[in-house]
Amino acid sequence: MRFYSTLFLLVISLFFNCNASNDHNNSDGSDDMGSSDDVNIPPPVNYADVDFSNWKVTLPVDENNNGSPDEYQPEVLKDFGYQTLEAVQPYMYDDTDDTSLVFYTFPDVSTTNSSYSRTELRELINIGNARENWTLLEGGEMIGTLKLDDVSENTNSGDDYHKVIVMQIHGIISEEDMTNYGFSSNNGPPLIKIYWKDGYIWSHKKSLIDENTEGDDLLETSNNTWYDIKVNLGYVGFDVFDFRITASDARIEVQLNDEEPYVYQDVSLDKWPYENYFKAGNYLTSTDENAFSYVKYYSLSVTH
C-alpha cells in the first residue's frame, strides 16, 4: 500500500513540474525568456516627404544683420540637415505627430521686392547658380499635400483671416536678357500665385493688359503691363488638400484635389518673356503687428 501511495505522489509531482515548464514556452516550443516581445521598441519616427536637394529657404528674420532675410542653401538643409540648424528651427520644423513639415512666419524682414515676410522654399535647378532657371517651353510640375494649420484673424478688412500664398511660379529675367538690356535687377513678376483666402484656394495668373504688347515692352514688370486673373478653385478650410501646378509651352494647369483641372492657355502665356522657378511654403500677405500663419506640408515634389 505504501508503494502505491509513493507512486501516486511521484506521478502528481511529474505532472505539475511538466506544466510549470510549459508555462515558459511558446506554442512553437521556443523559450519566452528574453524574447523581443518583452522589449519596448519605439515606433519609427516619420518625416514629411520633402527632398531639400534643390530647395533653399528664406526666413522672416535677419539674424546676420545684412539687411536681407536670412537664407539657407540646399547643402545645409538636405539629408535632414535643417533639423540641426538652430536658426531655422523656429520657422521650419517637423511635427512628427502627423508627419508634416511646419512653416511659421510673421511680419518682420521682407525681400527688396516685397512688403511681406515669408518662410518659403525657392527652387534651384542649379544649386550653384540661382540665375539658371527654366522656361515654359522646358516646363515643370510641382505637386504638394498641405494645409493651412493656423492663421491670424484680419480685423482691418472684410476678410476673416489674413491671406497666405502657399505656392508660386515666379518669373525671373534670364541671364541673356540681363546682359542684352543691361538690367540692374533680374526680378520678374510671379506668373502663378496660389492663395489661401478664408478657406478657399485661389489661383492668380499674370496676364497682359494689352495682348498686343511686343518685344522689350514685355519685360516691363509694372502693373501697367501685367495684371492678375483670379480664379476660385474651391473650399478646403483648415483641412489637408492636394495641389498640382503643371507648366508647359504656353499652357498652365492648376488642380485642387481630384477636381477638374483649371487650364490657362492664352496669348499672355505664349508671350511670357521670363524664365521661372517654383516656390512653396508660407508667404503671409500682411504687415499687421500681430499677424502670423502656420502652413504644414506633408509632401512636396518637383519634376522637369
Image: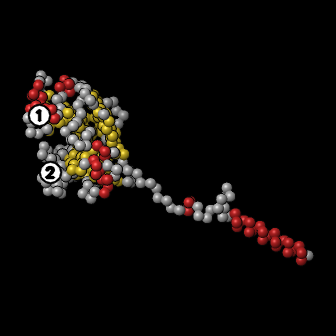
Give residue 98's position: percent from left, percent from top: 38, 51
Q: Which one is nearer the viewer's eye here, 196 or 35?
A: 35
Give residue 113's position: percent from left, percent from top: 13, 43
Q: From the viewer's perspective, is residue 8 above or below residue 124?
A: below
Give residue 250's position: percent from left, percent from top: 23, 26
Residue farthest top in this picture = 212
Q: Quadrant of residue 183?
A: top left
Q: Residue at x 21, y 37 (%)?
A: 132
Residue 119 visible from this viewpoint: no
Q: Quadrant of residue 253?
A: top left
Which quarter of the rendered picture does the N terminus lie within? Answer: bottom right
Q: From the viewer's perspective, is residue 177 above or below residue 127?
A: above
Q: Residues within 10 Å of mark 1 (few under 14, many from 20)?
A: few
Question: Badge 2 is on which residue?
Answer: 68
Question: Badge 1 is on which residue?
Answer: 179
303 sits left or right of 114 in the view: right
Q: Residue at x 35, y 36 (%)?
A: 257
Q: Residue at x 36, y 34 (%)?
A: 258
| Cα–Cα gap, marks 1 and 2 | 25 Å
Amino acid bearing label 1: Thr
Q: Which one is nearer the viewer's eye here, 220 or 153?
A: 220
16 sits left or right of 37 in the view: right
Residue 301 visible from this viewpoint: yes
- Tally of numbered tags: 2
Q: Which one is nearer the viewer's eye here, 113 or 82?
A: 82
Amino acid bearing label 2: Ser
Give residue 159's position: percent from left, percent from top: 20, 44
Q: From the viewer's perspective, is residue 219 above or below residue 147?
A: above
Residue farthest right in this picture = 1
